[in-house]
Image (cartoon, rainbow, N blue to C red):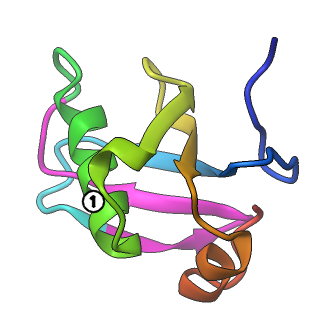
Amino acid sequence: MSGPRPGGRATDEVAFAVVLTPRGGADRIEAVVDGALRVRVAAPAVEGAANAALVRLVARELDVPAGAVRIVTGAHARRKVVAVRDLPADRVSARWPGLTV
């Protein structure tokens, strides 16, 4: 069974693409580029530290618990698909216009 993809719909999750830059100086969301969220985190890509920082940052930006955010695909890559549980897609689209959800 495959997970949600950008443009696809799950009944209880909204999913979107992320391009992550570890060791990016500070935890911040830079922009939406080509429908994907471009994110930098200070943590290195070692033992899941950058992924954990990404999850915390997305949760904080969307005002949801970190447990509601998960990495669907790309745990070991810069390009990822992130899903957020129990959040309407229009709220994500309003937060980051141009993001493909």
Determine the residue positioned at 29% across, 49% down.
Answer: 66
- What count of labels does the image hold? 1
Instruction: Depth check: give the residue in front, 28 or 73.
Output: 73
**For mark 1, does the 10 Å Cα neighbourhood hold few (<14), some (14 to 19), or many (20 or more) residues?**
many
- Residue at position x 86%, y 53% in the image: 7
Residue, x 23% and y 22% (percent of image)? 48
Depicted 44 relative to depicted 11: above or below: above
Q: Is residue 36 left or right of residue 39?
A: right
Q: Position of residue 75 (x, y in %)?
A: 45, 22
Q: Is residue 94 above or below residue 90?
A: below
Q: Which residue is mark 1?
A: 57
Most common secondary structure along the magenta stretch = strand
Position of 83 with respect to 52 (left or right) is: right
Residue at 77% across, 64% down:
100
Vertical side of 96 occupied by 71: above or below? above
Where the C terminus falls, by quadrant?
A: bottom right
Q: Amino acid at mark 1?
A: Leu
Q: Which residues are magenta?
A: 29-44
Q: Quadrant of residue 26?
A: bottom left
Classify mark 1: helix, strand or loop: helix
Residue 39 among magenta residues: yes
